Amino acid sequence: MSTPSLLNIPYRLKAGTLYSQLPETGAGDFTVTRTTTPTAGQSTRINSLGNIELVANNVPRLDYPLGGAVNGCPALLVEPSAANYLVRSQEFDNASWGKNATGIDTSIGTSGIQANVAVSPDGTQNADRVNFLLQGDVDLGLNQNYAAATTGQIYNTSIWFKGEGANIGKQIKVQMKRASGGTFVGTTATITLTSGWVRFASSAITLGASNSGVQVVVSSNDATNALIWGSQLEQGSVATSYIPTTTGSVTRNADVISVTGAVSGAIGQTEGTMYCEFEATNDASTRRLLTLSDGNQLNRIMIYYTSSAWRAQIQGTSISLGNFTSGYHKIAFAYQQNGVSGNLFASIDGGAVVSGTSATFPTSLNMVNLGKIEDTGSSSFLNGRIRAAALYTTRLTNDELQALTA
């Protein structure tokens, strides 16, 4: 098998740059941009110790598995823009969080909340304890409204929970309801408390033209003490990395990771192979994984997800690689020009090669994008993690495609 012309196993980085191992000239180093507003540095990752930590603007995020380095190597986190609409996301004793005296023992702590009593997922003692009462109505507990929710859009909420002592094994409910009319929407999601921190997420769709917003409600049918930290309400079906807030919502811009210009020599222009090891999630939106182009959507080769399937595409013609379970997978996609058209060949996880033919073939490719759309815009982000990406200037054989992804 030939040597890659471009190889990036995310490891070496600085603000604004993700270094590639090949080519050694630096022509394949990726430019990285990502900011947060209004507060710089509110993007997060899981570090090698297993703690959630803030990452400065434009610094590539090498995200470790839960638990840190003991559970595996880091991978490059690539996410779309997201905003946390819940204020005081770590301060449940704050007045921004409503407390219902029927569902919470408001005589304990500040209206039923004991602040900063335990070490949270960020490694500091800033987790709160909620004292739930025994009652049957799950609509009575801790709550916060977001009045600007858009009718018909999907929202998800996520919160970290942990159990203590005899409360381990008891259940907490997280729901979203219409702020006007009080109707619950989506599913009522339940988490069982464990001895470790668990991030709990649920999603719902805001309904009806009269909807004035969404209310997040945390409650329990048991007399339960639960540790709680890191709340988030965002638009979309999948919870993204945690965005801490104080007095207002905070927006984390997308991870834009691309290289252009001198990298054209590492792109196979008439034949080549694209490879990626990446994390698939249950995000149903259209997402790009690895794209080649000249900076616009009319001249492109790419691996992407749409309409419930991963696909490999030249210009406007794609072959379907099917859908597969959440978790890490490997895709190798080879292409070869044949007159004005081109041939496509792809393998996933060592499986049989899928092939097809495109009607036209691109020219003058000089841009590589990791986890974003093939032009200079900012859309169709992966919303997952990448362990490795590579390009070859030759069309690898079918046997090589299978061996590369096995």
Image (spheres, rainbow, N blue to C red):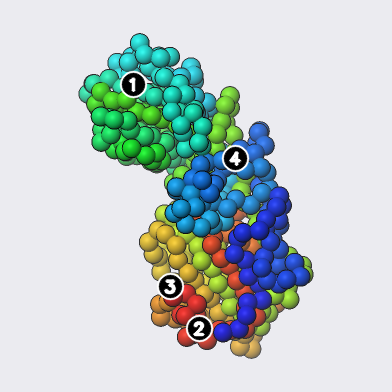
Determine which residue is flagged by label 2: 400
Q: Given this view, does label 1 or label 3 mark the residue nearer the observer?
A: 1
The span from disc 1 to disc 3 (Cα, nearest Å) is: 48 Å
Q: Given this view, does label 3 or label 4 mark the residue nearer the observer?
A: 4
User: Which quarter of the picture shows residue 158?
Assistant: top left
Type of amino acid under label 3: Asp
Determine which residue is flagged by label 4: 54
The span from disc 4 to disc 2 (Cα, nearest Å) is: 41 Å
Q: Is residue 17 above or below residue 184?
A: below
In the picture, measured across the screen, residue 406 lies left or right of residue 250, that is left
The span from disc 1 to disc 4 (Cα, nearest Å) is: 29 Å
Point out residue 162 in the picture as x, y percentages from the top left corner.
Answer: 36, 34
Type of amino acid under label 4: Leu
Q: Given this view, does label 4 or label 2 mark the residue nearer the observer?
A: 4
Determine which residue is flagged by label 1: 131
Q: Earlier in the sequence, mark 1 or mark 3?
A: 1
Number of other residues with Cα within 10 Å of mark 4, as a class: few under 14, some 14 to 19, many 20 or more: some
In the picture, measured across the screen, residue 217 lies left or right of residue 382, that is left
Determine which residue is flagged by label 3: 349
